[in-house]
C-alpha cells in the first residue's frame, strides 16, 4: 500500500515532542505498522485507498489522548529535549550579548562608527534570524552550524581576552594558596609564573577538549530534538543532497569571520587582564606583607637594613623617572627638612583600575629611620568586581564604640577587612605617634556617580588611642549620610 | 451489544495480559483477537492500546521484540513475563471477586424485587 500523508500526520501527532529520537522512531514505526495493516484490511473489503487510510486513522481515536498517555509514560525521557531547547535559547541570548559587546565597544578606534554599528547589528540580527529560521523549519544542520559558530566565538573570546588563562591560573594559584604552599610573595610569583606557562601550553588542548565535548553534545541534542527533518525527507521521498561539503564550508567561513570579529571585539574589550585573578590572590598576601613590613620598620634602622627588609617582602625601589616620584602627601606638620625620603613600591600586579600598589615611604635623618608611612592601595580582594569594603555603615557603628585610651589591638579588631581597609599608616618617631587611616568604601560600578567613602583617622601614642575622627563624603542611595551626621566633605 | 470508546485501563490491562498469556502478539493482532474473543463486544479506540502496552513494558510485565513478516514489514510483538503472569493471576482473582460481588448485588436486588 502506498504511503498516505493522513497516516503519517496522525502518527507524528501521537508522538510527544521532546522525546529522544529512538523513542519517537519506535512509536512511529509501531503505530504506522498498525494503521497500514488495518488500512490494507479495509481496502481488501472494498474501500478505496484514501477511504481505507482515513477509516484506519479514525479507528485509532484521538491523537492528543494517545500523545498525552505516551507523554506520561516517558515523561523523564523528555528531559534532554527540554534541556536542549534551553541550551539553544542560551546560545541565542549569547548571540545577542556578543552583539551588544560589539555594539558598545570603544568607538574611538580607527574605523567608522556607522560601519561599527552596522557590523554589530548585522551580526546579532543574522544569528538570531538563523536560529529562529532554523528552529521553525526544524533544520538541524543550520542550527548545528550556528551552534558551532557561536561556541567558537565564545571560546575565541575567552581565549583572546585572557579570561580563560586568568581563570585557569587563578584556580591553580587558589589551590596552592589553600594548600598553604606559598610562604611569601616570591613563592606566589613563581607559582603564578609556572602556572601561567603550564596554562599557555595546555590551553589549546583544553580548548580543543571543551570544543569537542560541546560539539558532540550539540550534535546529540540537536539530533534528539529535530528528528522531524529526516522524517519529512523520507515521507516525501526527496533525495536529500549530502550537505557535508556545504556544511563544512559554512562552518569554515563562520570560523574565519568569528576569529576576525572576536579578536577585534576582545581587543576592544580587554577589560580582563590575564594577571587579574592571579594578581589579586597575590595581592591578598601583599597586603598582609605590606603591613608586616611596615610593622617591622623600627626607629634608627639604617638605610641598608630598611632596604634589605623591604626587599625581603617583595618591595623594590623603582628608578626615578623624569619629573620625580609622585609623592603622596605626608601628614601635615611633619617636616621633611634634612631627611632623605625614599618611596618604595610593590606594584607588580597593577592592572588598570585595580589598585594594588603598596607604597612605603621612609625618611632618614643621619642614616637613621625617623619616619615611615605605608599606602596600601589594595582596594579589592578577588577581581571580577568584588568589592572588599561595602559595609560603610558598620564602619561608622564601630567608630562610635571607640574610647580614648583603648589599646591599639582592641581598636584594630574593630576594623577588619570586611569593614574597612587600612589605607595609610604613618609613624612619626619624633612624636612617638602612629596615625592610621581606615577607609570604607561603597561604589556602584554601574553608576560612578553613586559612591560613598568613610575615612577613619586614628592616632595612637604609646599603643593607646589618643584621637579619632571620622569623615565621609559621596552621594549614595544606599547609605544616608545625613542620618549618620556625616554630610560634611572631607 | 457493543462497548464503544475507551474501556477502563484496568480491564484493558487484564485482557491484554490474558491474551498474551496464550501467545506472543503484536498490537493490531491483539485488537482483532480481543474483538473476536468478545464476539465484537469490545471495540477499542485502537490507539489507546499502545500506551497500555508501553506502560506494561515499562513496568516489566511484558517484553517486546521486532519481527519481520513476508512483505518485509516489521511488527512489534509482546511477550508476557513472569512478573506479568503474577499480576495477571492477581488481577483475575480481583476481577472474579468484583464480578461475584456485582452478581450478588444484582441477584439480591432481583430477589428483593420478586418478594
Image (tube, rainbow, N blue to C red):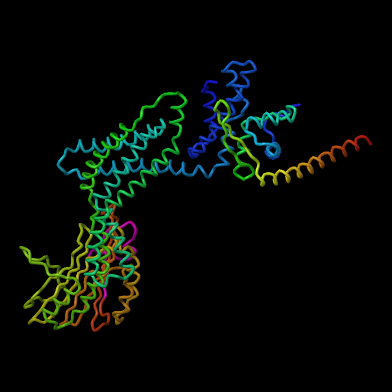
Judge whether residue A57 can be spotted in this image: no
In-front residue for pair A388/A93: A93
Query: Which stretch appears magenta?
Result: A468-490
Looking at the rendering, which quadrant does residue A173 occupy?
bottom left
- Among all residues in the image, which is located at the extreme front? B70
> Compared to A485, does A145 lie above or below?
above
Choose top left, top right, bottom left or bottom right for residue A341.
Answer: bottom left
Please determine whether, in this image, residue A256 is positioned above or below residue A296: above
Coordinates of residue B110 in the picture (x, y in percent): 88, 35
The quadrant in which the C terminus of chain A is found is: bottom left
Q: Tell me if B33 is positioned left or right of A393 in this view.
A: right
Q: Nearer the viewer, residue A372 or A336?
A: A372
Residue at x-position 32% and y-position 33%: A247
Asked if residue A478 is among those painted magenta in the image, a careful observer would answer yes
Say if the magenta span includes residue A150: no
User: On the rendered structure, is A480 left or right of A49?
Assistant: left
Q: Which image quarter holds the N terminus of chain A?
A: top right
- Is any atom of residue A98 visible in this view? yes
Q: Quadrant of residue B65?
A: top right
Image position of A29 (left or right of A194) = right
Horizontal and vertical percent for residue A314?
19, 71
Give how far across and how far down residue A132 sits, in percent: 38, 34
At 14% across and 77% down in the image, what residue appears?
A: A308
Amino acid at each position: 500500500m502506498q504511503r498516505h500523508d493522513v497516516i503519517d500526520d496522525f502518527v507524528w501527532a501521537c508522538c510527544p515532542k521532546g522525546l529522544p529520537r529512538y523513542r519517537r522512531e519506535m512509536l512511529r514505526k509501531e503505530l504506522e505498522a498498525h494503521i497500514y495493516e488495518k488500512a490494507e484490511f479495509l481496502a481488501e473489503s472494498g474501500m478505496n485507498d484514501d477511504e481505507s487510510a482515513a477509516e484506519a486513522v479514525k479507528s485509532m481515536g484521538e491523537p492528543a489522548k494517545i500523545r498525552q498517555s505516551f507523554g506520561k509514560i516517558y515523561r523523564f525521557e523528555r528531559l534532554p529535549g527540554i534541556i536542549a531547547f534551553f541550551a539553544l535559547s542560551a546560545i541565542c541570548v549569547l548571540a545577542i550579548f556578543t552583539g551588544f559587546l560589539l555594539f558598545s565597544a570603544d568607538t574611538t578606534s580607527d574605523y567608522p562608527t556607522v560601519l561599527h554599528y552596522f557590523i554589530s547589528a548585522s551580526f546579532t540580527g543574522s544569528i538570531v534570524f538563523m536560529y529562529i529560521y532554523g528552529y521553525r523549519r526544524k533544520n538541524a544542520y543550520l542550527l548545528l552550524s550556528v551552534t558551532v559558530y557561536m561556541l567558537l566565538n565564545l571560546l575565541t573570546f575567552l581565549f583572546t581576552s585572557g579570561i580563560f588563562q586568568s581563570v585557569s591560573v587563578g584556580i591553580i594559584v587558589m589551590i596552592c594558596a589553600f594548600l598553604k604552599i606559598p610562604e611569601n610573595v616570591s613563592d606566589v610569583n613563581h607559582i603564578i609564573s609556572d602556572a601561567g606557562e603550564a596554562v599557555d601550553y595546555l590551553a589549546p588542548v583544553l580548548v580543543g577538549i571543551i570544543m569537542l565535548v560541546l560539539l558532540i553534545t550539540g550534535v546529540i541534542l540537536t539530533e534528539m530534538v529535530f528528528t522531524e527533518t529526516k522524517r519529512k525527507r523520507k515521507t516525501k521521498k526527496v533525495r536529500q543532497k549530502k550537505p557535508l561539503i556545504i556544511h563544512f564550508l559554512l562552518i569554515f567561513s563562520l570560523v574565519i569571520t568569528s576569529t576576525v570579529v572576536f579578536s577585534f571585539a576582545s581587543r576592544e574589550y580587554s577589560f580582563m587582564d590575564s594577571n587579574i585573578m592571579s594578581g589579586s590572590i597575590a595581592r591578598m598576601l601583599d597586603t598582609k606583607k605590606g603591613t608586616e613590613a611596615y610593622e617591622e620598620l623600627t626607629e634608627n634602622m639604617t638605610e641598608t637594613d630598611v632596604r634589605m627588609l623591604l626587599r625581603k617582602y617583595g618591595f623594590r625601589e623603582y628608578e626615578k623617572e623624569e619629573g620625580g616620584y609622585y609623592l603622596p602627601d605626608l601628614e601635615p606638620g611633619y617636616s621633611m627638612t634634612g631627611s632623605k625620603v625614599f618611596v618604595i613600591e610593590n606594584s607588580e600586579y597593577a592592572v588598570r583600575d585595580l589598585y594594588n600598589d603598596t607604597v612605603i615611604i621612609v625618611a632618614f635623618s643621619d642614616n637613621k629611620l625617623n619616619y615611615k608611612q605605608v599606602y596600601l592601595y589594595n582596594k579589592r580582594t578577588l577581581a571580577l568586581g568584588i568589592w572588599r569594603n561595602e559595609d560603610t555603615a558598620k564602619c561608622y557603628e564601630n567608630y562610635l564604640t571607640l574610647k580614648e585610651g583603648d589599646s591599639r589591638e582592641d581598636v584594630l579588631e574593630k576594623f577588619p577587612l570586611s569593614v574597612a581597609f587600612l589605607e595609610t599608616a604613618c609613624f612619626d618617631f619624633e612624636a612617638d605617634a602612629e596615625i592610621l587611616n581606615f577607609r570604607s568604601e561603597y561604589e556602584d560600578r554601574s553608576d560612578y556617580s553613586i559612591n560613598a567613602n568613610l575615612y577613619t583617622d586614628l592616632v595612637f601614642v604609646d599603643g593607646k588611642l589618643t584621637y579619632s575622627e571620622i569623615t565621609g563624603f559621596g552621594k549614595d542611595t544606599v547609605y544616608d549620610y545625613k542620618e549618620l551626621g556625616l554630610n560634611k566633605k572631607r | 451489544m457493543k462497548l464503544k470508546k475507551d474501556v477502563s485501563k484496568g480491564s484493558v490491562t487484564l485482557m491484554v495480559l490474558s491474551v498474551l498469556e496464550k501467545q506472543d502478539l503484536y498490537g493490531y493482532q491483539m485488537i482483532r483477537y480481543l474483538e473476536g474473543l468478545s464476539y465484537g463486544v469490545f471495540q477499542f479506540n485502537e490507539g489507546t492500546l499502545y500506551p497500555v502496552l508501553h506502560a506494561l513494558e515499562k513496568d516489566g510485565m511484558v517484553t517486546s521484540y521486532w519481527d519481520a513478516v513476508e512483505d518485509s514489514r516489521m511488527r512489534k510483538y509482546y511477550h508476557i513475563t513472569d512478573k506479568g503472569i503474577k499480576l495477571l493471576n492477581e488481577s483475575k482473582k480481583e476481577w472474579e471477586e468484583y464480578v461475584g460481588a456485582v452478581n450478588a448485588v444484582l441477584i439480591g436486588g432481583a430477589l428483593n424485587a420478586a418478594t
